[in-house]
Image (spheres, rainbow, N blue to C red):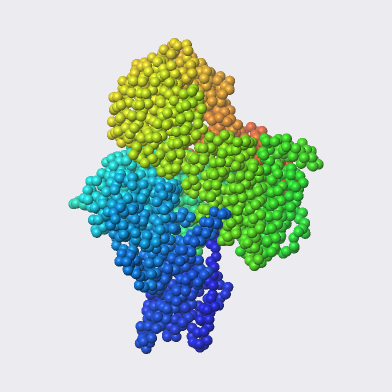
Amino acid sequence: MAFLDKSKRAPKTPIAIDQSWVNILQRYLSDHPSEELHESIQKVKDLLYDKEATWEKQSQYIKSVGKTLPSKKSNSGQQSSLSSHFINQIESILEPIISGIYFSSITTLTNRICIPILDSCYMISNRNSFCNPSIQDQSNNKENKMIKEFEQEYSRYITLDNYTTHLFSQKGMSIYITLDFPLGFSTVEKKLFETLQFFNECLSLIIQNVNREDEQKKKSSPDPLSLAKHMHDAQHVIKTLLALLARFDQNLRPQFESIWNVFASDYNINNDKEEVVNKLVPDLLNECLVICSDNNYIKDVRQLAGMTMAATLNLLGSSQFVSKQVMVMFFASLNNEENQHDSDFMDHLGVKIPAILFKETEWNGGDPLMLPICRGLLSNLDRKVLIFPLSGKFQFKISILRSNDSNPKTLHHILFLSIANFCDNALNSQTKVLAFETMGLWLQETENTLRNDETSKLYDNNNSILNSEVLEKLMSYVLDNWEDPVDAIQFKVKTIFEKLLDIISLKSQLEQSAEFYNDYLVNLLNQLLIMDQYRKVKYSLLLLLLPRVGTVKILSIQPEFVSKTLEVLHNLVIAPRASAMMVTFLDLHLEELFSSEFRDITIKKDEKREEIVNEWIDLWLTPICQGLSSSDDILRKNIGAFILQPLFKAKSSSFWRIIDILQNNKHGNEFINNERYRLNALIMVLKVGRSLDFVDGNMFIENSIDTNRKNIRLQLLRDAIYHLDLNLRIDVLGLICESRKLTSEITSTELALLKSFFQLNLNSTSPEFRQKLFGHLNKFFAKLRGNLYNQWKNYQSHMKYVESHKDSRTGDAHSEIKQKIDNTRSFLNWLIELLTASLYPGASFQRVSSALKTFVILIKTFGIENTPLPEGFVAQHCRTPEFPFQLSLASARNTKLILHCLMNPFDENRTLAYEILQEFPSPLPGIESKDNVQKILFWALQSMTSTRAGESDSGAMIFRLIFSKYVLNLNLDLDVEIKQSERLEDYKKVDIPSINFTRKLFSLLKKQINIASENLLLASQKFPMHGTLLALQYIFKELDYNSLEVKNNLEEWRDTHSHAISLINKVCQIVLEVLSNPSPEGNVPASFQEMEEMIDELVLNLDEDPDREEGGPKHQVILSCCWRAVKEASSLLAIILSRAPISVSLETNFSILDYEKIRKGGDLFRTLLTSIRHRGAFSAVYPGYVAVCSRLLSSSQVKFVELPKMWLEDNINNIMANSVSITRRSAGLPLCILAIISGEPSNCKVLLPWTIKTLIEIGSQAPSDDFDQTIDSHQVHAFNILRSIFMDAKLGTDVLPYVSDGFILAIKGFSSPSWAVRNCSVMLFSTLLQRTFGVRKTKDEYHSINKLTRREFFSRFPQLYPFLLDELKIAVDQLIKSTKVSQSTVHPGLYPILTLLSRLHPSLMDGSSSVLTMNPFVSLVLSCSSSPIHKTREIAARAIVPLIPSNDLIVTCSKLINESVMSNQNELHGRLIQVQYLLRGHLRSNVANFDIMKDFLVNMPPIFKSKIYFAFKNNSCNITRYLYLDILYEFVIDGNWIFIEQNEEKRLELIVLMEDNFLELRQLIFDMSLSDMRSINKNQDIYEVGYYLVRQQMTRIIIKSLTSQDNSEHSSIIIDILSDSDYEVRLVGLEMLIAFFNSSKYREICIDKLMLQCKIIKMIFQEEPYQNCFQRAVELLTLIDSENPFPKLISNNSLDFGLEEFWKKLLNYMEHVESSTKTEAILPLLGSLLSQIWQDDSLPGNFKSESLNQWCKYIEKNTKPEVLFSIYLFKEPNLFKNEDTQQIITLYLVLVRLAQDDDIDLRHSAALMISEASGLEAPVDCDRAREICFEYMTKSYSKSLYLYVSLLQTITGSDKPDEVINAETNPIRILFVVENPNIYKEDLIDIQLAYKHLKFAFNKEGNVLDFPDAFKRDVPMFAVEQLRKICVLLKDNENQNNGILGFTSRPTIFIVVYRVIITVLVMMEIASNKQVIIKEIKSLINELVEDKIQLHPLLNDILFEGFNHHFDDDSKIIINNDEKFEKEFERLFLLSS
């Protein structure tokens, strides 16, 4: 819930008007009383005398002053026209006042406004002196006076004694801005040393203040706000200092260099300036050093200090001198004595280098202090200083530099080594950003050096920096950090990569070694192309490489590059990056083709250009078309979204070429991947073309044969609109709605298509579909509005022309325009009727939602009373255009229908309805009188006080609407309760309706509270509070606190808010007892006896029967009431606290809440969160607390900001208290803390680091020796809170720096003696895995896209490397020791460590040379292979995969296999499973390259062969036998892993190599497996442990081998396998055969299909005992020959039964089957057999008919809604063409039912079957399929009486109308209503379909078909009698308050009445006593009219319009036009045809 309004900026403080400014003005006016004032002076006067002006108004005054003065840009004539007295006024009044404002301002924006005025004054004064000869001799004085005045003000400003209210930061910013205009710059230049001295003093004071804060922090809690102020001051002071040193370097250098001269020559200082400089420089250096060496200062301040220090050093002398001083200060000490004098210079100055800068820990820590210094040196030292060669001997102070072998010769090189060290050891994201940014700066500096001719020569002499090792290191930064979740890090490493490539290119040019550059790029390109395709870095780096390497090089390395890249677009994460790269690649390739072909061309350019374009199109045409026709929805969508538009923009001819391919079936397999998706591809392409204006509505034609290829067949679009595929339907809507021009014409064809779309798709259940639908409709209606404006303008122009010219042709033109306008208006009116009709009672959620949302779009586009102007229209520039008509959106009927939607059970629909009604005028149309409003309010009260949440929400929403529309807008005084007391207790009487209305709600809530306090059960059942609380929420949401109504009645509203808070407290106290129970759910309480006693005590107070449970079980009712009450109460409190104006006190302001109320409100939130045990309740409280904390933490008042901090500290302290005991994952305590830290502003996270650090400290504490497992320890709470923090998405990137600490805590927690801590550790570990690796993007969590490479992982979390290694050593040592003593104990930390390692991914670019080498882990993980625990061995096998580089794969696997022995089966199993996972992880995951694959094929066969005995009888362990066989099958027998290789030539080479090298081994494995299988059958002992696994694997090997080679024993071997006594073997055999027959290679097999069929039929006939085998056998039988599953030609020896016996056997199974899976299997087979039976002429006809009847019976039985399993139907269209009409009608009705089933597979299967049976080219949607069924039945079987009976049954339904109405009038009130789970079935649609087609059948066959008399006479009369009963019941219920639409607006009542009316209407078509019926009906209708019975508008329409067709003109009944639909009922508003 959005509690907070959109944040507004805090108001700026007005400028304080100084009295001296007023005196200046008054003095001048008194001296010149009659002088005319310049306009600028008048504005200044207004400014000075407007005491109440806000800052905004004051700034307008100052801006207006500037506009009256001439500027540099204005004409000089303007200034010359100024008279002398005006100039005098400007100099005497304006300049001193503006100068005063400039320096007294506390906002920089004010300074910037003043600058143009000061510039103008300075210019006027100078020109005046120059242009007036009479005052030439005084000019200097005037000029000096003006400048002196500014200088004097400036001099006062830069002292600590004046402007004391200004912060140092404000002064720093002001002077920084002063440098931006001439007067200011010259002033600062003159006062340069004074300014520097002033800022030096400021900086010294800031340092003292920070030190004082640091000391205070040690004694007590720190003050983060005060420290933040000091940091702000320091930042702007140092920033200004840096600007001064940089801008005035020429002024300062001589003075600064003089210091060295004095020191070198040993003479004394002679003047004050030298003394100032001599003191200033060391002070600056010392202050900057202090700041840089103290991590109390934020990184930005330290960074600026480092830059300022470097800028100061840079001015001290020559390049050599500065370079030497920097070396001595920070990096090295000089060894030779001759330079010792130089090194003493800093000591002489008194510069003290902090020793902490040289500590090794500070160079390797998470926040290195030297990093800002290095950055400052790099950015602010002169380039010559950096590259000046170092002379003499020196000793590095830091071991990191001493241990480096590169022997640096320049400061530039030393800085690189230092920065690289910081990059390697950065532990948090902030440090990484700064380190990588500094490295990027170093590379930029290097590039600049190389580009400069002078410096490049010096750099060449020291060119050893960028060697191959350094290049590799820089590249590792890119690869390891490119996919970092922190965007800033990604950006910085991108800069490193770009600069690295630039430098290598420059070096190659300078060294004339282009070959080196090209080789480097090609090697890098090769690495990227073979990289895992799911690495995001791959495509980003390729995109950057493309301009450098070109496309030809890529295609030469990987010819199928385009198709391979397009393949990954199915992944939503990779698609944006891959597509951006692909588009750039193709654009560049086209450019390259043009540039290469047009160099030396002699033929016509146009011909060559077309040839080049076709060549370019050929490159991508096939893969694009295949991708667009792929079965992957996401792939098609991404190609359309990312790829097509740029291609078509580049060359439009490519669009029409694709259209030609997709629209014509002559183009086949080459371009089309799946023919089923050809239409999808076409619509996608057309949609993109439409967005580029390649296609318009006039191109859609009916004629399918057209020579012009730039036409689109209209039938294709219709097929798409009705298509089964949702994506296709939404794409065709996009095609209709898309257009680049808003005024492009919309044709009647497009409107007709849109009509068809609306009728079918308003009921879509897909949220994504509906979202796209509304997006397209927004565009379409905006375009339609522009069309209408344009057409009406043209029509008016034509009319004027016709009036003046009488031209018939023009008349035809204007008539045509008018017709278009009328057509559009007709369409919009039709749409409005469709939308309102879709709001019928009981309509599905999605239909109502779609209708309301479309209504919102119509209102937004066409308005309620006035149509909005077209987009971009500016009324100032032209006459306002007219709109031809105004849509009737806010009619009385529409108002009532939409108002009734506020009672919809779905919140989204209620919200949409409310939004619509808010747009309607007040009062709402049709609801004008107070009585009507009051009646609606009482109707809403019934719902609002309901126990059901949906009903109470609906009632509260109506209260909100009435309050907004009638109480606030119209000031109606309305009652809340039916018996509202005239006098409201405890309130002063006021005449303010809004306050009275709120107080009346308070009165109602008080009554409910009083009842609840006495009897909670009674209150829960009869008087719930949550609805009233929700209504109050809506009331307070509608309040505008800036309105006069609130401000003028402030005391009353304060009392109202106070009373609301008081009531909230009472509600919470009442329900808290229940919700804080140890088991609040009530159904299974922890202390059932205690709970029962409490409830029984409540029940005893009731007068009624205590055994009666109204609304549900007592516990459930009470709990529901309580948690809903606390949910709404807390939300109401949150709305009040987060919206109402607040201040510390309520004196002299417009605030409503003071500090104390805010504090108490927060305390209540904390009490609720820390006391409630019910998860739903405290989760509902949490959002409100977040809103309150967010507001307080963003407040401008310090006291409010401190409040959440106090709450946080209190909560943390309470964790340590033993009294805190909250079960169930600490209940609401984590949310209580999370609410505060997540509410912090994103730019200032102070509380989060402190909280996490504190919680980790608490969690790390060991439990006490006497800890109680039944009481929650503080460690448990710490773990649970940390878990919530890491789970919170809002804190996603903020918590990443603490992930390492979290992992360490969690893994250590696994070893805790406390079970609760261990349990919490598991949950925390799982949360951290998700935070680190992200949410699973595929089902397989071990897929490469769900992993990080080991380099990425340990680069992000380097702290984990040593920790995991140490912990793993301990765990493995314990495992080995326990194994030696035959124990199976596992260290608790082993599993989490191995799990973490297993989630890493091996990288192509990993190697042993990596800084974080994984070699130490390898030996430890390999040691786990001998563990006696199977799970340990398996998880270790997963963990070893990322630890082994691909280059070591074959060596490692060979070693593992060769060293394996059978004497230790555990170790053998462990080694083999490690081999298996290694091969899978590298060979099957696109990690190993071609050479490694080739190495495997060459070297591994002998090794496998040497250990072949592992797999067979020599090995006594079946588990290891199975495992070795599994490895052999996966990597030797089955060679699918080879197809991972992307290059086709290399792939073919690998296949040939495999066939050659594996031939002998494969044959050996096959022979031994077959021999073992045959011998096993004779072996009696087949029930050994794991024996079946071995046999299963052998079966796979045998069948796989048989399907890939010729063998005369094929069939007999397979039959033997299917006859095996072991069902697991039979099952594997069947599954292998099913997979094979499903593949495209099954035709190549030499298996005797007849023999196989007979065997399977026997298995089924003999009732295969194992269910899975039986199911697979049936499936395989239909696969072998779906048309003839029972073989026609069989020998006598094959089967001893025929088709009839087989059929009867299957029927017998169906009769006696107990398993639903068998039924699912048999039904499709029965369908296929039935098809075969009907095609077999040799079978008797009665057998065929009987078979059909039996099959239909089972289909109908097993497709009813109550049947829970899925049925896969046969697809045999011929069955629908037989003569047994009753069965076929039954079958069609079954299909209609299945098309509405809640199982998506069933719905789609039914729709596909109907589409095929109807002979449609494209499958249609389920709704359209139902209509087709009815159409076909009616047209084909209208002579069957069974059809009429079936359709009539569909209309009437199975329930009796009077019973339904009686049940609705006396409902059983239960708390939770069981809703219909099938949202796809709408009874109203079925009724309308049945009515439409039954009426059609009557009219078609009524005179021919002889209906029984009873049918024609009794059925109509029965229907009339039912209608009479209903009318009586409606009269009986009319006196009740049934809402705006009456009793028939209830869904059940509506559908019953609808059924009866429709039944009467349709039966009148054939009624034999029609006149009697008409008379009866007319009598009933007259009674309804006379009694004023209110019917739903839809029922009115049907009742009156429907029956009026049968009445005479004179006797027709007329009703109010506002209450009926202006359309014909015959059109059946919800059908698509």
Camera sees residue 956: no
Which one is in front, 1768 or 553? 553
- Answer with left or right where residue 1741 lies relative to residue 1617: right
Residue at 57 percent of width and 54 percent of height = 220
Q: Position of residue 797 (x, y in %)?
A: 45, 65
Q: Position of residue 1344 (x, y in %)?
A: 41, 37
Residue 1547, by quadrant, is top left
Residue at 39 percent of width and 36 percent of height = 1414
- Say if 998 sits above or below 37 in the image: above
- Answer with left or right where residue 680 lies relative to residue 165: left
Q: Position of residue 538 (x, y in %)?
A: 36, 43
Which one is in front, 1485 or 1320? 1320
Residue at 37 percent of width and 79 percent of height = 76
Q: Position of residue 1648 (x, y in %)?
A: 39, 18
Residue at 58 percent of width and 35 percent of height = 1314
Which one is in front, 207 or 341? 341
